Image (cartoon, helix red, strand yellow):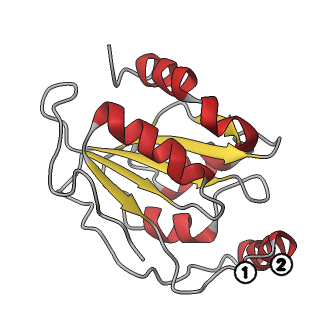
Amino acid sequence: MADISKGAGQTRSMQGSKKILVAYFSWSGNTREVASLIHKIVGGTLYEIVSVDKYPSDYNECVDQAKKELDAEYMPKLVSDVEVNGSYDVIFIGYPNWWGTIPRPVASFLSKCDSGKTIAPFCTHGGDRLGQSVEDIATLCSRSTVLEGLAVRGGDVGNAQSNVSEWLRRIGMTE
């Protein structure tokens, strides 16, 4: 289910009066953990992207489904929507790197965000880092500014605080 939780309806001042959305899709919980770290630092609204189509709990079955969706350029319906256009200036978008790019629920979400936003991508991965995901996000959101992405290895999520903090400084989101 979509999670517009802690910070829902609130934004913390960042770079002036920018309104922040930390949106994420998480299959294993790793991306959720990184999204929570970012949210604790920058504030804003935390939103979980959830596809109406459920993913199998078995890793191999999930990977197979993700590949079929990618090959078909499938745009799944999402359980809930968050009004992005006009409501947020900066969108942090988190996802697991599946097949070298963003999962299709993230593509569905981003297809509604192409309106001059600042997009800060972050992913969790098993070794492929960001893959082609940042370029694919830039293509989907061609009228937005896509910042340098952050890649966190799945096994390192529990120790990612310093990497997240450094990335946020590098992209100008914190001092």
The image quarter in which residue 53 lies: bottom right
Residue shown at the point (55%, 71%) measured from the top left: 105
Which of the 4 image quarters holds residue 26?
A: bottom right
Q: Callout 1: 10 Å neighbours few (<14), some, many (20+)? A: few
What residue do we see at 30% from left, 63% from top? 4
Q: Quadrant of residue 173?
A: top left
At label 1, the amino acid type is Pro
Q: Earlier in the sequence, mark 1 or mark 2?
A: 1
Residue 118 pos. (x, y %): 35, 40
The residue that disc 1 covers is 56
Q: How many marks?
A: 2
Marks 1 and 2 sit apart, C-alpha to C-alpha, by 6 Å
Q: Position of residue 17 (x, y in %)?
A: 12, 33
Q: Identify the residue at the far right of this view.
A: 60
Q: Residues within 10 Å of mark 2 (few under 14, many from 20)?
A: few
Q: Quadrant of the C terminus?
A: top left
Q: Is residue 80 left or right of residue 137?
A: left
Given contact means CB atoms under 8 Å apart, are the residues at marks 1 and 2 in contact?
Answer: yes
Q: Position of residue 24 (x, y in %)?
A: 48, 56
Q: Is residue 105 left or right of residue 155?
A: left
Position of 46 relative to 56 (above/below) = above
Q: Residue at x 81, y 69 (%)?
A: 59
Residue type for callout 2: Glu
- The residue at 46%/54% (across/down) is 141
- Placement of 12 over or under 113, stated as above or below: above
Q: Toward the viewer: 28 or 144?
A: 28
> Helix or strand or loop: what does disc 1 sit on?
loop
* Residue corresponding to mark 2: 61
